[in-house]
Image (cartoon, rainbow, N blue to C red):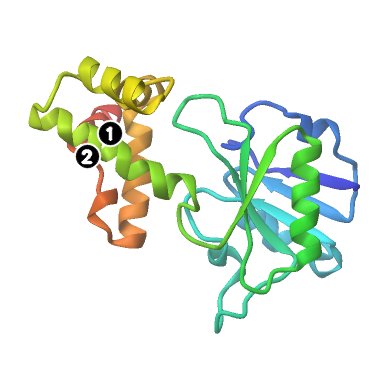
Amino acid sequence: MLYEVVDTGNRRSFPAPPALHEKAAARGDAVVIIGENVATALQSLDAREGRFAILIELGTEALGVHTGESRADEGSNVIGFARFRLGSAEPTALVEVVRQPCSSEAAVAAAIEIFEAAGLQVSVCGDFDGRILDRLVRPYYNAALRRLDEGLATADDLDTTLKLGLGYPEGPIALLERTGLEHHYDVTQALHEALGDPAYAPARRARVAKARSRK
């Protein structure tokens, strides 16, 4: 499938020019909009209705922020996506493709085809803040940080226990320190504001890290 890439800069899912760019055309029936200014690019896109599929990069927000919502029958050729990434670490190979209740099935299929052709793996989910992975892992990271604050065990012992007990390649404390606790704050704060669930409220150590990063 021929598609073009509209790069608005400071892209999170694709920090380095990826295979996605290499396979792009000057003009295509599908458009992939990446970077931090996708909303502006979407609004100014020529012949929006004539496109087979329009894929826009999301942060933690819902796709409906960009496309609008009505009576749970929203959906069009605009599909959201986010490549999972923890803080400053390299993005993973997983792309979460976001659809609305009545999204075009052809557009969803086009998104899957484009990302898989770029060597990525795709999971399709509904239009919810944080999607699948952040909704599942952020409370886990918060819980580990809070147990450290409570003195349940040292950071090393918490990490070792979770690695040996659950088979994780890296413990949560070491992982968050390596990728940036301030980034964990950004995601959890956004989810807490959107969902109101205390499980997403940034742990104290993440709040401290964010405050220090602002100095």
- Could you tell me which quadrant the C terminus lies in? top left
Q: Which mark is residue 203?
A: 2
Q: Which mark is residue 198?
A: none
Relative to 64, 21 lies left or right = right
| Helix, strand or loop status at disc 2 | loop
Which one is in front in this view, the residue at disc 2 or the one at disc 1?
A: 2
Question: Which residue is pictured at 34% across the width and 20% down the height?
Answer: 164
Residue 177 point in image, percent of width and height: 33, 22
Up-down: is 110 above or below 175? below
What is the CA distance from the residue labelled 2 to the residue labelled 1? 11 Å
Up-down: is 17 above or below 2? above
Relative to 118, 130 lies left or right = left
* Dot 2 crowding, Cα within 10 Å, few <14, some 14–19, many 20+: many
Question: Which residue is pictured at 71% across the width and 70% down the height?
Answer: 76
Task: Specify the amino acid type for callout 2.
Answer: Ala
- Specify the farthest residue to the front: 165
Question: Which residue is pictured at 68% across the width and 59% down the height?
Answer: 79
Relative to 177, 113 lies left or right = right
Residue 192 point in image, percent of width and height: 30, 54
Q: Can residue 177 be seen in this view?
A: no
| Helix, strand or loop status at disc 1 | helix
Q: Nearer the viewer, residue 132 or 2?
A: 132
- Specify the farthest residue to the left: 151
Residue 86 point in image, percent of width and height: 46, 32
Q: Can residue 59 be seen in this view?
A: yes
Relative to 188, 203 lies left or right = left
Q: Quadrant of residue 6?
A: top right
Question: Which residue is pictured at 56% across the width and 37% down the height?
Answer: 12
Look at mark 1 in the image and give the residue it sits on: 210
Task: Specify the amino acid type for callout 1.
Answer: Lys
